[in-house]
Amino acid sequence: MEARSVAEGKERRDSARWRLFALVPVVLLVAVVSLFSARGGSVLELVGESPPPADEVDVRRVEFSPGEIRIRVTNPQREDLTIATVTVDDAIVPYTLDGSATLGRLGSTTIVVPYDWVEEEPIAVGVTTSTGIQTTEEIAAAVETPGPSVDGFLGYAVIGALVGIVPVALGLLWLPSLRGARPEWLAAFMALTGGLLTFLAVEALAEALELQAALPGALGGTGLVVLGVAASYLALAFLAGRLGGGGGTRGRTLGGFGLATLVAIGIGVHNLGEGLAVGTSFALGELTLGTFLVVGFMIHNVTEGLGIAAPLAEGRRATLGRLAALALVAGAPTIAGAWLGGYVTSDVLAVLFFAVAAGAALQVVVEVGRYVSRRAPGGLGSGYVVGGFLAGLAVMYATGLLV
Amino acid sequence: MSNSRGVTRRQLIVGAAPVVASVPFAGMALAGGREREATHLGHAATGHAAMIGPEVPAPGGPHDLDPLTYPPPALPHQPGRVRDYELVARDVDIEVASGVTYPAWTYNGTVPGPVIRATEDDLLRVGFMNGGSHPHTIHFHGIHPANMDGVFEVVEPGGRFTYEFPARPYGMHLYHCHATPLKKHIHKGLYGAFIIDPPEPRPPAQELVMVMNGFDTDGDGENNFYAVNGPAFYYARYPIRVRRSQTVRIYLANLTEFDLINSFHLHGDFFRYYRTGSTDQFEYTDTVMLCQGERGILEIDFANTGRFMFHAHQSEFAELGWMGFFEVTD
């Protein structure tokens, strides 16, 4: 008994020592870093002189209201920036700032310029820093930026519902037909879902990477994308485990309502990013608020409803309430995205959203793949599955052309 | 689908002339110091009237440009008299527009350099010391020996050279660095006005010097700011006071780099323009166009008192700083 407690005590002491040793690298790192910060300059001088900072501002957003232009700028570099002169179409203009003219790292300010701009004509705003470096942002066509109004709020909601919820709900109406389908055809439709989601994942990833490239380096573009993709993939994998966990040992492969929920979530996350893009573009006057565009998105998104319906075709009958819930999960985020895009707009947010969408879609593709490989007559290699998958990609591509 | 960038955008009409010259100056009065509080400005008064006086964002104090604006007096004709000048090339950071500094190369610390003035047949002796970080010269316009031309005798940093030659012909001339790369050495600020007075003195007048220049502060080969005698909008902030009773004589030169031409336009009156100022031939006009290196003498007899604007008639130059006022009083 005594011997045992002695052994235990030794173990505890060992463990404490182990923890203490873990601190050694950290302590040494702090020492080296502080030494280098104090004396490092002379080391760097051996290598050469640093070039001067770029001194360009990052123009985040340009908004127009009658007789006024508002320019939101951020300092993307480590060194301070001081705003000295503002130009509109190559003319120095008066302006006011909502704070100090000197911006620290990632500091932002809004430049307000009283200006009689011309509706629907191109316009270029320039911000010159104290070192004379001018950053110019060209706006293809000046249009009044909608302010936060009840009408606008409702408008975004209606557009979000039209391009998000309605088509998904319509797509779900294919469910009765799917229920009558033969197993190999059902497998084909499941594969089609996989194709749709693969398309969405790749597209969202490309979008995230493209947007991050435009971000100031300090915000850490690619890392943000990797983080978003990984976080959402793992979160959905965890969710998939929970949804299928009840079914004992065989619950590893999701099916039926659980899989449909997962697909709906994956699509919903994607639609959040889509709503964000649409809202932002409308708000900044980059997209014409055309009926054609909304129609294009509707047709495009009907296929998403089909994707959710496919896993439901097998197994227990889903209640209308559950179907409505699925449509909301997949479609409603479009509304939230449109609001965010229309009123807040943050490129960082957009990158993160698209990265999250890519990760979510990828995870659902994996889940769908597992399901198909287990259930499809002939497995993943069957003609129905391969054809369905390719058809899914093709359908997304073709309807995407409408947008 | 997810967006936006695929959607056709209208092409920017690059280089389109500014639509209404006056508009951007609206409410210039509200652009005060460096720390500004946001206020809703609404639609401030449009027109140039708002763009005058202490609210104009121009660097410098009220008399900073006096040595460049008001030339030394003309001396009577006295052949062989020695006129000594000392020019030192120095690298100096100057404020070319409100809050914007530019690493300039200067003669005696200013851009443009000091006004050099002599009477025809004076012996001009200009001592040049290169205190800058690059090789420089002084190239004078006018008639002089080849070895005084400031082309071959490049003065290395720390070096000295003395230019010595009889001043002729009379007229408005200029001087500038002729080291290569020429474009860089000129637009960095190494230039100035060089006046040679005729043997027969010109009639008395209120004399002014205006050297038109520009600054490319971000190195993209296009000027970000334009002005006369240095800083943007200086004479809008500090109008030049003249009397109606006496002729106003302006020695005008164009040393703008990058842009092929510059111009001078006077509001509310006409002037006699003597191209190069070396003959008595003149043109009666209110607008003159000058090529790079071109210069002349303007004589204005103001008919009215009040504030009269002068500026480049290239609207873009005017709105980027090349604009000022005469305050004409009795």
Image (tube, coloured by chain):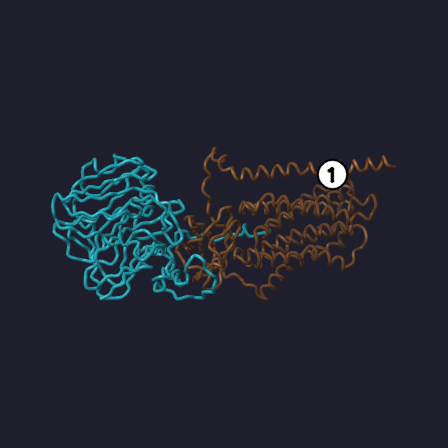
Chain colours: A brown, B cyan
Q: Chain of mark 1?
A: A
Disc 1 residue type (three-letter): Ala
Q: Quadrant of the C terminus of chain B?
A: bottom left
Considering the numbered disc 1 on the image, is that residue within a helix, a strand or a loop? helix
B328 left or right of A79 in image: left
A357 left or right of B105 in image: right
- Vertical comparison of B121 with B234: above or below: above
State the image coordinates of residue B13 (x, y, percent, origin top left).
42, 53
Along the line of sight, the residue nearer the viewer: A41 or B209: A41
Asked whether residue B301 is in view, the answer is yes
User: Residue extending furthest right?
Assistant: A1
State the image coordinates of residue B245 (x, y, percent, origin top left).
19, 64
State the image coordinates of residue B187 (x, y, percent, origin top left).
33, 45
Along the line of sight, the residue nearer the viewer: A366 or B204: B204
- Residue at point 45%, 56% (across, down): A122
- Residue at point 72%, 36% (across, down): A18
B149 left or right of A248 in image: left
State the image coordinates of residue B67 (x, y, percent, origin top left).
26, 52
Which residue corresponds to mark 1? Answer: A16
- Residue at point 68%, 51% (across, down): A267
Along the line of sight, the residue nearer the viewer: B6 or A24: A24
Asked whether residue A188 is in view, the answer is no
A46 left or right of A333 in image: left
User: Residue extending furthest top?
Assistant: A46
Please tell me how crowded label 1 is: few (under 14), some (14-19), or many (20+) other residues with Cα within 10 Å.
few
Along the line of sight, the residue nearer the viewer: A328 or B300: B300
